[in-house]
Image: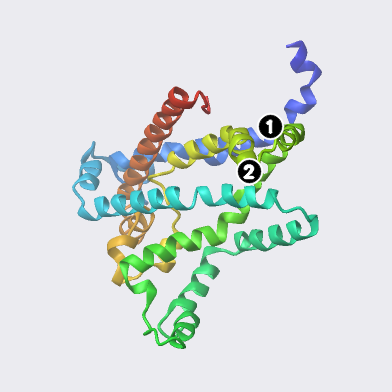
């Protein structure tokens, strides 16, 4: 208590943060009871009819729901394999740029796409990748026939993943650059004296040094495997690629919000939270067992 009294003004800074989470994150959690009700917006949570597990059974027996779960898992797993290592590679490459001016120019260039919303970026991609778009006009010079890349499932997935790298690689690399900057420079100097090449320095010093950061972010990413943003798949998706573009967030929007089936959308959200909790706990325990690194 003496320590708390001595640092009481610092602890007061926590009050706005705790109030934010209490009001906007914990208080609305009472709405989870809608998953067990036939919710009526005029009767509210306290007046709506209780229906037990019937809404959850409806979700489980819905074919569209399992299709959206499959697509969400596939897109997230693909992104985890391809997109997750990209910022690590970029951070290592940027760390090797000797001229500080060039380093800042490159960093600014790769950070900028992060500040463009998916609404704007999706519009740019749709224009560029349409049959009369810039990409097809350029390929037409070499006699390659035009195609609509967002109308075919395989090319849609490629565009989805690559656009994620384009937008977030720079921003995501910041935390790895900070981790690399915290490494002791004398270790690199000792390695140079021993004749270690750049590749060996990266393999034996940089990667082991930032391993805790990599594992932390990997666990957090695994914990979001059943969650996916709404804007990107909704804007890039269309009826031609609904077999791969219909994810949980768009499924909730079209079946829960548009059709005012709030109990259904709440049940789907509860399913996501439970699965994500299981995944993040499992990933944390597995990491603790295999690498001795974990979040808790």
Residue reaching furthest to the front: 195
Q: Which residue is mark 2?
A: 176
Res. 108 image quadrant: bottom right
* Residue 5 vs residue 128, the one in the foreground: 128
- Label 2's element? helix
Res. 110 image quadrant: bottom right
- Looking at marks 2 and 1 on the same chain, the residue that comes earlier in the sequence is marked by 1
- Label 1's element? helix
Instruction: Give the residue drawn at x 45%, y 28%.
Output: 287
48 on left or right of 83: left
Q: Which residue is mark 1?
A: 15
Tell me: residue 197, above or below residue 93: above
Between marks 2 and 1, how big is the CA–CA gap? 30 Å
Q: Residues within 10 Å of mark 1 (few under 14, many from 20)?
A: few
Work out which quarter of the rendered image holds the N terminus and state it: top right
Residue reaching furthest to the left: 61
Q: Position of residue 225 (x, y in %)?
A: 40, 44
Q: Position of residue 200 (x, y in %)?
A: 61, 40
Residue reaching furthest to the top: 2
* Residue 124 vs residue 270, the one in the foreground: 124
* Residue 223 vs residue 210, the one in the foreground: 210
Q: Is residue 40 visible?
A: no
Q: Is residue 273 visible?
A: yes
Q: Position of residue 149 (x, y in %)?
A: 38, 74
């Amino acid at each position: 208590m003496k320590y708390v009294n001595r640092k009481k003004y610092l602890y007061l800074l926590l009050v706005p943060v705790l109030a934010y989470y209490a009001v906007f994150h914990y208080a609305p959690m009472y709405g989870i009871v809608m998953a067990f009700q036939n919710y009526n917006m005029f009767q509210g949570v306290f007046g709506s009819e209780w229906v037990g597990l019937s809404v959850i059974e409806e979700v489980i027996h819905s074919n569209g729901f399992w299709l959206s779960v499959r697509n969400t898992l596939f897109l997230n797993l693909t992104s985890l394999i391809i997109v997750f290592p990209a910022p690590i590679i970029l951070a290592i490459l940027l760390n090797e740029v000797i001229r500080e001016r060039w380093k800042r120019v490159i960093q600014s260039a790769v950070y900028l796409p992060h500040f463009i919303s998916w609404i704007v970026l999706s519009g740019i991609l749709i224009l560029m990748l349409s049959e009369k778009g810039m990409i097809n006009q350029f390929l037409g010079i070499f006699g390659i026939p035009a195609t609509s890349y967002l109308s075919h499932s395989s090319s849609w997935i490629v565009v989805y993943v690559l656009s994620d790298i384009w937008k977030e690689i720079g921003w995501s690399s910041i935390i790895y650059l900070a981790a690399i900057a915290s490494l002791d420079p004398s270790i690199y100097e000792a390695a140079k004296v021993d004749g270690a090449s750049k590749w060996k320095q990266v393999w034996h010093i940089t990667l082991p040094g930032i391993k805790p950061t990599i594992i932390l972010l990997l666990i957090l990413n695994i914990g979001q495997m059943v969650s996916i943003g709404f804007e990107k798949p909704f804007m890039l998706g269309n009826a031609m690629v609904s077999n791969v573009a219909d994810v949980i967030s768009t499924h909730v929007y079209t079946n829960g919000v548009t059709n005012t089936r709030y109990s259904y959308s709440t049940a789907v959200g509860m399913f996501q939270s439970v699965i994500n909790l299981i995944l993040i706990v499992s990933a944390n325990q597995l990491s603790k067992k295999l690498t001795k690194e974990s979040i808790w």
